Image (cartoon, rainbow, N blue to C red):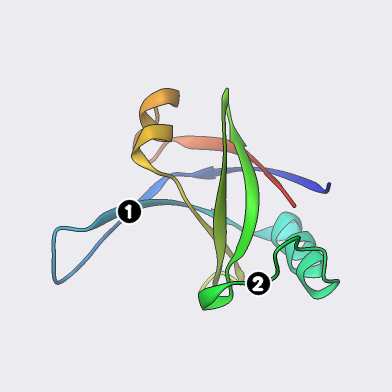
Amino acid sequence: MEDFTVTAPLWRWRSATGPAVWHFLTITGEAADGIRLAALGGQWLDGRRGFGSAKVFVTIGDTRWNTSIFPHRESGGWLLPVKAAVRKAEGLAEGDAVTVTVSL
């Protein structure tokens, strides 16, 4: 298993057409490059998914869960959605610097 740990600000995306709100971390730099290389090397257990996403195991604080990350064209990195249950369990709010470990 390969691990990548980064600290990034938690940010919010809101739908222009409805009430949907999502919170994300953007993974950039060396960690994003490492994830990309792992993807190119075929190290994803279940392969790449829709929108170019990949299944990963994530840890923030004491909270661990399986999710998917998505390529982010604007930054050249990856987007990690952070669900409400995780934000609540870890006391996270928009703008907080969050340390996350992404495991492949």
Q: Amino acid at mark 1?
A: Trp
Secondary structure under the numbered disc 2 in the rendered image: loop
Between 61 and 10, the one lying in front of the other is 61
The answer to whether residue 12 is left or right of residue 103 is: left
Dot 2, how many residues are within 10 Å of its Cα: few (below 14), some (14-19), or many (20+)?
Answer: some
Front: mark 1 or 2: 2
The answer to whether residue 92 is left or right of residue 53 is: left
Q: Are marks 1 and 2 in contact (CB under 8 Å)?
A: no
Q: Position of residue 30 (x, y in %)?
A: 76, 57
Residue 42 against residue 86 in the figure, above or below: below
Q: Position of residue 102 (x, y in %)?
A: 67, 46
Q: Position of residue 25 (x, y in %)?
A: 49, 50
Cα separation, mark 1 vs mark 2, equals 22 Å
Q: Count the marks: how many?
A: 2
**Mark 1 sits on what residue?**
22
Between 11 and 17, the one lying in front of the other is 17
Q: Residue at x 14, y 71 (%)?
A: 17
> Which of pointers 1 and 2 lies earlier in the amino acid sequence?
1
Residue 58 against residue 71 in the figure, above or below: above
Q: Amino acid at mark 2?
A: Arg
Q: In which image quadrant can residue 61 be found?
A: top right
Q: Position of residue 36 (x, y in %)?
A: 74, 68
**Mark 2 sits on what residue?**
48
